[in-house]
């Protein structure tokens, strides 16, 4: 799968099989996990639980 930047809708729109759709969904989950893992040390302790 290419690494081009596009919206989630655009990425899912061209998928036809469940496996392809799940592949995109897993990529979304990985991106979110990486984003929040990077963000966690940068926020105050009082709200850190929200990003962990």
Image: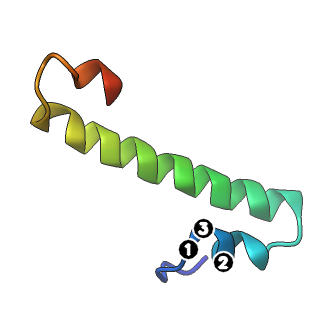
Q: Is residue 52 visible from the viewing direction of this image? A: no
**Vertical arrangement, residue 14 with respect to residue 47, above or below:** below
Q: Residue at 88% of width from left, 72% of height from top? A: 16
Check if mark 2's residue and mark 3's residue have beta carbons within 8 Å: yes
- Above or below residue 9? Residue 40 is above
Q: Residue at x 48, y 78 (%)?
A: 3
Q: Considering the numbered disc 2 on the image, is that residue within a helix, a strand or a loop?
A: helix
Tag 3 secondary structure: helix
According to the picture, the residue beneath numbered tag 2 turns out to be 10
Position of the N terminus, as image quadrant, is bottom right
Q: Find out whether the residues at labels 1 and 3 contact each other: C-beta distance under 8 Å.
A: yes
Element carrying mark 1: loop
Q: Is residue 25 visible?
A: yes
Q: Is the residue under label 1 in contact with that under label 2 (CB below 8 Å)?
A: yes
Rounded to the nearest angstrom, the CA distance separating label 1 from label 3 is: 4 Å
Say the numbered circle drawn on residue 8. 3
Which quarter of the figure has residue 19? Answer: bottom right
**Residue 47 image offset from top left, x and y in percent:** 22, 22
Instruction: Say which residue label 1 marks.
Output: 7
Cα distance between the residues tagged 2 and 1: 5 Å
Q: Name the quadrant containing residue 36.
A: top left
């Amino acid at each position: 799968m290419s690494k081009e930047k596009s919206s989630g809708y655009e990425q899912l729109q061209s998928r036809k099989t469940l496996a392809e759709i799940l592949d995109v969904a897993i990529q979304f989950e990985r991106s979110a996990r990486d984003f929040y893992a990077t963000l966690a040390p940068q926020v105050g302790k009082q709200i850190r639980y929200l990003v962990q």
